[in-house]
Structure formats: C-alpha cells, structure tokens
Amino acid sequence: MTKRPPTLTTLIFSSWLIAGVVGAADPQDGLVAYFGFEAASAAGLQNQAPGATGFHAVRVGGGAFDSGANPSGPGFSGNAAFNPGNAASDRSALLAGNALNLVDTRNDAITVPVGSADLGGNFTIAVWHALAPSGGSVARPFVFEGTDNHNVSWGISGGDNYTAYVTQSASLPFGVLERGPWHHVAHVFTSDGTTTTLTLFVNGQPAGSRAGASAAMVFSGIHFGKHRGGDHARNWDGMLDDLAIWNRALTAEEIEEIHLKGRHGFALTESPADAGQALVILQSADPSTGTVQGGGLHPLGTTISITSTANPGSAVTDWTGGFVSQPVAFDWVVTGDIRATANFGPDLADDDGDGLTNYEEILIHGTDPNHPDTDGDGIPDGVEVHTTRTNPLHDDSAWIAVVGAALFAESAGTIELATPEVRPTHDGSRLALTFRAGGPDGEPKPIALDAGNTTVSPANDGLDLEIRPPANLPAHFLPRAQRR
C-alpha cells in the first residue's frame, strides 16, 4: 500500500474505541508480518514488517502469478475491465497504491508461514479485502484460513454471509458484506492459558466475540485467498491489501486507527502527520446510551465540530481523555492526534413533572416523558407506578368512574389510592375502608364494607376487598388492606 495524496476530508464517525490520550501505542509494535503488495512478483511478497528477516509469503502451490494482459498477484494497479477468462470483473477501485489481485480459477492464493508457535496466545490478524462484484465461480470464497485447519478463519459460509472461527468448534457468524467495496477485518485473539477469545472487528467496529479452548489453537501457517483444502473450491476472487499479523492483541483504538488511515489512503506503517493530517479518535463509553460525532482524519489547523449525543433516556455526563471538561458539543482546532471518550448516564430530569425521571419513563416503563398521563386515564404516570400500582400504559378511566361512584359521588373522577386503612367505626359495629382521595375537600372518604357491591374476605394476614363494577367491565378493583 502506498500513501495517496490526502485529498479526502470526509468525516469518518466512530462510536466504539478503547479510551485513550495523545501518544497511544504504535500499531507497528509487535508487528510480525506485513505486506503492502506494492511490488510485483516475489518482491511484492517480501515481509515488510520493521526488522523482519523471515515469514515471507509464497504463492500457494508454487509457480508464478499470471503476468499477462490481465495479471494477478502483488503489484496489481487496477483494471475496470479485468477479465481472467471467464467473465469481466471490475477491479478498479483500489484502496491505495497497488494490491494483491487473486483469481479463483487460477488457484491464486498466498501462504504466510506464521503459526501459533510463532505468535503465542495473544495475537492479531488484519487485512483489507474486496470481493469482485462479478466473474467469480466460487460459492464460498475465503479471505484467510489456517493451512491445516480452521482454528483461524474468515470467509463466506453461504449467501455472502461471513463467519469467523476460534478453534474449529467455535464459530462467530457476522453477516453480509457488500461485494465490490473494500472492507477491513481484524481478528484479535487473547488467551488466559485455558480459554482463547476471538474479538472480531469489521470496518473498525467491534462485531462480537467467541471463545474456544486454548489447547486447540494450533496451526502451522495461514493461507490468504483460500481455505485449508488443497483445491481451489473456496478461493478468493478479488483483491487483498495491507495484510498484517501481530504477536499481541491490538486494542480497539489501534484497529480503528488502522481503519481510518486505510480509508484515507495511508498504510498502517505510515504517519498521517507527514502529510499534514491528524487522527481524532472518539469513543462512546456505551454505544447503547449515546454516540459521538466528529472523529476521523483531519487536516492540521482545521476547525471541526465535536458532538456527543445521548440516546433517549440517557444524558451526557462528561468527557475523559483529551476532551476533559469540554461541553456536550464544541468546536476544536486540530493540532495533532487526540483521543477521547464521551460518558453517558441516566437522564434524571422529569420533563413532564409526573414523578418519573425521563430515564424511568423511556427505558423502564415505556411511558411518554413529555406527557404526565400517558394513557390519559386521569392518573399521572408516577402515581400509577408508585401509588396505585396500576399500569401507566393501560387506560383505567372506566375503573376510576366505578370506584369514584362507589366511594363518593361528589368526587367521581381522579383518585389517589394513598395508603388505604381499615378501621372500626366509632360505635364499633362495622369496619370502614378509607382512601385519601382527590375530592373537593381532599379528606378520607368511608366505604361501608357491608354495602351491596362489596365483598370482604380474609386473605393471609389481610383482607381482600372487592368492589364489583358493572357487568360490562371485565375485571375487579381489588385493593388489599391490613386487618385492624
């Protein structure tokens, strides 16, 4: 991959990175094998990792790549009318510089002789890939797989759906990636000695994880552009670029940095600062609660807009990293690489004054934070949740009418069932149930428990009171009061 003149200024947005500050780890640390595929033939398969003296790639099966009018192999400079002999296949959209072009019908693929013994328990495999939109004859093309098993693997399992593996018994399905465009994939493996966990990143973003037994994570090398088998039934038909293998687990921040640089024409071994560019890498501490905007690769000296946006029910609390003490949204003059995290928490405001926070309304009860009585039955949402224990999403207006009529005709309408009490009457001849009600004077109102439409029966340590509604209503109003 060769650096392209930095003419793109489109913002690349990210919402999930490990928190960081200026001066993060160098993605070249621990780089065991790297291939930019700029040169043709064998020179393009030489390991370009800093200080590398081995682990050079070789063409699978030996021999040479096609060097005719429709060439394959490293050093490919693109061709919109590329035709390997079976159909035209547009391969003009290079990521940057030259690439490795592979043709499935020619059994094109390369092997990087780096195995589990060389990498240890923690390692990372990353590569850019572009599957030709037409011309391929393989139903399940693979980007890479172990030479002798699929303990490490990334390819199509059917219907353009990609699947990753960690050990041969633990798969991690991803989904569909569009044919034609470039996509970046990174497999990050971490081991505690017993269990190896694969964390998958696609186009800079985390895409799930899966674990397998560390003892099973053994492979002697990695094929790129084919699966573990000796035939070409699952060969890649398209291009690969910026292939890299590390003997450590990269952070999410490092992977997003590589992704951003690649999208703007920079190899992972290049510094955007040399071209007057800087990385602004942003993180949402929890993408389910909020997002961030404004991150990406920007020209030095430009002013950019940084925004943290909370999802409904959440609120921005603060920034950490390079933007400590900054407000929710602000302008920033780019002077160098910077990394920051936006943190979010519950929205504790009560916009409609109903006694429930916006967080409770949206994320717990599903009520309207801008309407104090979501179901319109006359009982505020907070009262239904905390006092009457009724459903704030169910219209209880019919019950309110029944109970109001049964309790006190002059106060029919909204009531608040606040701590009902059962007490003997003054002469001790009977019990009476009282409610604090929304009547004209707000005073407790008695109900005769021997009234025709009420039934009282013992229940555990209390009494069940049933006030029977009209026959056309489907249920009973059934408060409970302690026996006195």
Image (tube, rainbow, N blue to C red):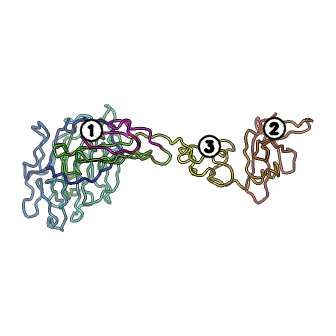
Q: Is residue 455 magenta?
A: no
Mark 3: secondary structure: loop
Neighbour tally class for label 3: few under 14, some 14-19, many 20 plus, Cα within 10 Å: some
* Foreground tag (2 vs 1): 2
Quarter of the image that includes the C terminus = top right
Q: Which residues are magenta?
A: 315-341
Mark 1: secondary structure: loop
The residue closer to the viewer here, 230 or 5, is 5
Sequence order check: which comes first, mark 2 or mark 1?
1
Q: From this viewpoint, is residue 298 visible? A: yes
| Amino acid type, residue under disc 2 in the picture | Val
Q: Is residue 50 left or right of residue 281?
A: left
The residue closer to the viewer here, 217 or 365, is 365
* Foreground tag (3 vs 1): 3
Residue visible at 19% across and 43% down? 273
| Amino acid type, residue under disc 3 in the picture | Gly
Q: From this viewpoint, is residue 227 visible? A: no
* Foreground tag (2 vs 3): 3
Residue named by callout 2: 422
List x then y, in percent, for residue 400.
Answer: 74, 52
Residue named by callout 1: 250
Sequence order check: which comes first, mark 2 or mark 3?
3
Q: Is residue 448 left or right of residue 442?
A: right
Residue named by callout 3: 355
Q: Is residue 343 left or right of residue 200?
A: right
